[in-house]
Image (cartoon, helix red, strand yellow):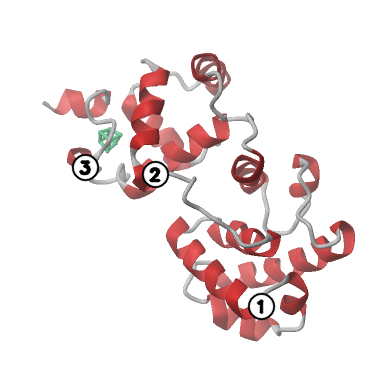
Amino acid sequence: MNSEFLFELLRKDSRLSFETLKFQSDAHLLFFLILSSRAKEEVALEISNKLICKYKSLDAILNSSLKSLEEDIKKIGFYKIKAKYIIEASKLVIKDYNSKIPEKFEELIKIPGIGRKNAMKFLSLVKNENFHLLLDSHFIRVIKRIGYYNSDYKHLEKEIKQSLKDCSLTYFSNLITNLGKQICHKFNPKCSRCCVAKICQFNLKKR
Ligand code: SF4
């Protein structure tokens, strides 16, 4: 499998890109990260856009009630726990980091609602760090279908890192994960609309 060619195909597909995500402030990005956990990115983005218009800052969130925040985000899955996380995360970021999201992985994962995956996503979005592969269920399903059958992900990480050189592994993972969320569904993958169909082993075997 030629990882470089795969990356080129993924990067050209604007449906999968993270580069289109723009955030007005740290508060906006924090809301998005918490909301996007186990949810569709477009829904998380839409709701985080509404939240930042309404609340403007982390301080403003603390002046709202849990009930009204739940009401604001109830369109998204797990909204009750996410509303709690938004309040707790806002408190912590205001108190310990002067309202700026910290940029160290070890600090990020201590923020409520920001697990390892979101911390890596943050670093990929903000700092374009060359980190690790993000192994969520979408990533694993898609990468296997494409043709990386080896489940030794350390080896895969090394191989992809070597062939992509300048690319952030997190960014690469995000593209694959987005492909899984939007096109390569668990059941009924939409191969005819897929940017990697011509090199995907799963698709080629169907012919
Ligand atoms: S070609 Fe089909 S199976 Fe392969 S990655 Fe695309 S949607 Fe998934």
Residue 55, relative to residue 90: is it above or below?
A: below
Q: Amino acid at mark 1?
A: Tyr
Instruction: Say which of 170 and 84 sits in front.
Output: 170
In the picture, residue 188 is in which quadrant? top left
Residue behind mark 2: 16
At which x and y percent is residue 107?
A: 80, 46
Compare marks 1 and 2 and give the one earlier in the sequence: 2
Residue behind mark 1: 55
Decide: few, some or many residues near mark 3? Use Cα within 10 Å; few <14, some 14-19, many ≥20: few
Compare marks 3 and 1 and give the one earlier in the sequence: 1
Question: Does the image show residue 119?
Answer: yes
Instruction: Report the image quarter containing ligand 1.
Output: top left
Seen at 38% across and 48% down, the residue is: 181
Q: Nearer the viewer, mark 3 or mark 1?
A: 1
Q: CA distance from mark 1 to mark 2?
A: 29 Å
Instruction: Say which of 91 and 125 sits in front.
Output: 125
Q: Secondary structure at mark 2?
A: helix
Decide: few, some or many residues near mark 2? Use Cα within 10 Å; few <14, some 14-19, many ≥20: many
Q: CA distance from mark 2 to mark 3?
A: 12 Å
